[in-house]
Image (tube, helix red, strand yellow):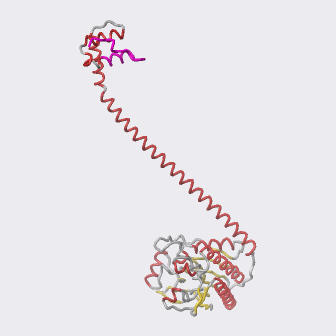
Amino acid sequence: MDNITTYKRFENETDEELIYRITGEKEQIGSWQTVANILNELLGTEYTESKFRKQRQAFDKMLAANQSKFVDSDTQLKELQLQKQEIQKEKRKLYDERLDLNRRLREESRLETTIEKIEDMLSNIANKRYLEYSPVISESENNMIVCLSDLHIGATYYGFDGSYDSFIAKERLEKYLSEIINIQKTYNAENCVCILLGDLISGSIHRKISVTNKENVIEQVKLACEYISDFIYELGKYFKSVELRGVSGNHSRLQDKEDALLGERLDTLILWFIKSMLKNVSNITVFDEDLDDTLSTFFVNDKLYFGIHGDFDSVNDAAIAKLALWAKMTPYCVICGHKHYPAMTDVSGIKVVQSGSLCGSGDEFTRQKRLTGKPSQTALVVNNKGIKCCYPIELE
């Protein structure tokens, strides 16, 4: 190939780039002399073919010597790209976490605002409805333990074997209060412990219960708070001091039995509400914290009492011993509910008192099981020796 005018120099092409390009086409051009002629023409030089041939060899040696670096750079580039992708993923995760955190902070803020509004509402009720009083009670060796068990506020049924609704529940609580006042006067009882033994509301743990409830769960909680607060407020007028304690029952859980958490039962919330509502009455103390939501422990006249609902504990030697071992204390007496009928027994030297229910029989469950029972609650007169007398008070 002798026509050197076929080759042109590219715009902004350096001498080295031109030499590298033309010598790279040596096989097409032909001989090294022809290559030298083309380059001398384009460069304006008069070099021999040996100069360009050796320069090409130097180019090739340099390229071969640095080939691994070019390959490593390509690998490093890929690694950098992967690292960049991982960084992008982490940035996305961080962004999502930040969104989730902000969402939870907003929810907590709304919850705190709601709680503050509830506390303000309860404070207003307390200031208007539950005013301070100062009962004059003489000293006595006798005290009382008053049970409020299985109220099932919200349950509604009417039948030949029993009737119940929220109005009937209120009437029975008023009658119960009247009976307690008579007992207090008879024994000149000085102080009182009122123990809420769970199932204060009917709840909605089963479909059959939800269908027969007159009020929804929120209304049930409101009514239970109102009824019990009124009950305790009036009770406090006849005792030097009243302590209110409580445990949770199975009917107040929020989910099915398999999924429900022990700490998420509405009976605990009711106790918290009542504490806020009765805060102005100095001789009434509400204890909303205990060893556990399922166990309340308290002393009366130096005797240790346990309050439980009864859904986790049976009334037999093994169950009572297991309860004492779990609590790491041996009680003088265990007070429970859950079974819906009153009873009193002795289990290995430990007294067991079982309180009845405010609703009695007549609901779907008792009808299917052919169970009958009168509505009742239990009150105890106690002193230094322990239980002086037990009153299972029927409330028809």
Seen in the picture, residue 35 relative to 374 is either above or below; the reply is above
Q: Is residue 37 left or right of residue 133?
A: left
From where the camera sits, is residue 299 visible?
no
Residue 52: image quadrant is top left
Q: Where residue 368 sits in the image (x, y, percent)? A: 49, 88
Q: Quadrant of the N terminus?
A: top left
- Identify which residue, 358 or 78, lies in the foreground: 78
- Identify which residue, 243 or 161, lies in the foreground: 161
For image coordinates 56% across by 55% down, the residue present is 103
Residue 127: image quadrant is bottom right
Q: Where residue 377 sits in the image (x, y, percent)? A: 60, 87
For image coordinates 58% across by 93% down, the residue present is 160
Q: Where residue 139 sits in the image (x, y, percent)? A: 70, 84
For image coordinates 62% across by 60% down, the residue present is 110
Seen in the picture, residue 92 relative to 265 is either above or below; the reply is above
Residue 154: image quadrant is bottom right
Q: Where residue 126 sits in the image (x, y, percent)? A: 72, 72
Residue span colored magenta: 1-22
Seen in the picture, residue 172 relative to 79 is either above or below; the reply is below
